[in-house]
Amino acid sequence: MMRWSIEVLKVCVSCLSLCVCVISAFSQSLDGDFTFSLPAGRRECFFQTMKKDASLEIEYQVLDGASLDVDFYFQSPSGHVIANDYRKSDGVHAVETEEGDYMFCFDNTFSAVSEKVIFFELILDNMGDGEESEDWKAYVQGADLLDMKLEDIMDAINSVKSRLGKSLQIQALLRAFEARDRNLQESNYDRVNLWSCTNLVVMVIVSGVQVYLLRSLFDDKRKTRT
């Protein structure tokens, strides 16, 4: 009876450890996406702290603003220029990192009147959370009683987490594409309406001038003597 109670306790501890690991696996996420407005004649810089031998990927898009372009600057902690894009509407840059703060800037100083709406996404990998995820093994005892391997379960969980993260990234990019296309369509709609009204006014003026000229050709300007 005592042996059976100990085995049940071990199974409960194993299940509890697995649940804690599952919760931590799905709650920790270092990726992020941001949307901000960059006024005309301004430059905005952001910093991301990275560990050595990790990977950093940044993707940006200009969602709204004249010409849909912006200057982009990407610099490593040692001062090395990783990327320097000139008046682009989107871009993707990835780098194997060193320890320190990475700086990336969006520059709209070339524009005097147009404000830009910019979306960018950061994807961080190998940030050292793998060592923490292995700590659960020190607390699991009696796993052989479950007739299954917790490592296989954790591999499946990590695979699901990775695919969910990719799905979130793709959804964020699709939302950014949709926002940019919508803003472009609204801008084209306003532009078409403006030029349509302008053409209509010009046509009315031209028609009036033509009518006046035609009538003037048939007017009898000779004076009748009585």
Image (tube, helix red, strand yellow):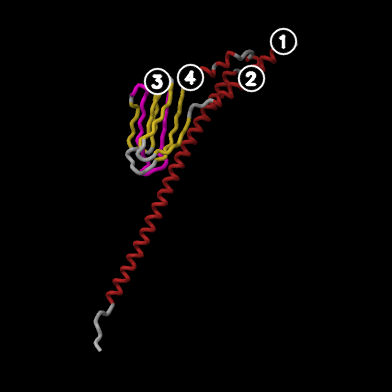
Instruction: Name the quadrant containing residue 140.
Output: top right
Q: In the rendering, at what x and y percent does residue 141 appear?
A: 62, 13
For the magenta stretch, what is the residue range?
A: 55-79
- Depth check, mark 3 against mark 1: the one in front is 3
Residue annotated with mark 4: 128
Answer with mark 2 or mark 4, whichever residue precedes in sequence: 2
224 relative position to 89: left or right: left
Verify whether residue 63 appears in magenta.
Answer: yes
Name which residue type carries label 4. Answer: Gly
SS type, badge 1: helix
Q: CA distance from mark 3 to mark 1?
A: 52 Å
Residue 221, above or below 1: below
Residue annotated with mark 3: 98
* Quadrant of the frame with the C terminus: bottom left
Q: Which residue occupies 55% across, 16% down?
A: 135
- Depth check, mark 2 against mark 1: the one in front is 2
Answer with mark 4 or mark 1, whichever residue precedes in sequence: 1
- Depth check, mark 4 against mark 1: the one in front is 4
Tell me whether circle 2 and circle 4 mark residues in contact (CB < 8 Å).
Answer: no
Answer with mark 3 or mark 1, whichever residue precedes in sequence: 1
Q: Which residue occupies 37% across, 55% down?
A: 195
Verify whether residue 23 appears in magenta.
Answer: no
SS type, badge 2: helix
Residue annotated with mark 2: 16
Residue annotated with mark 1: 3
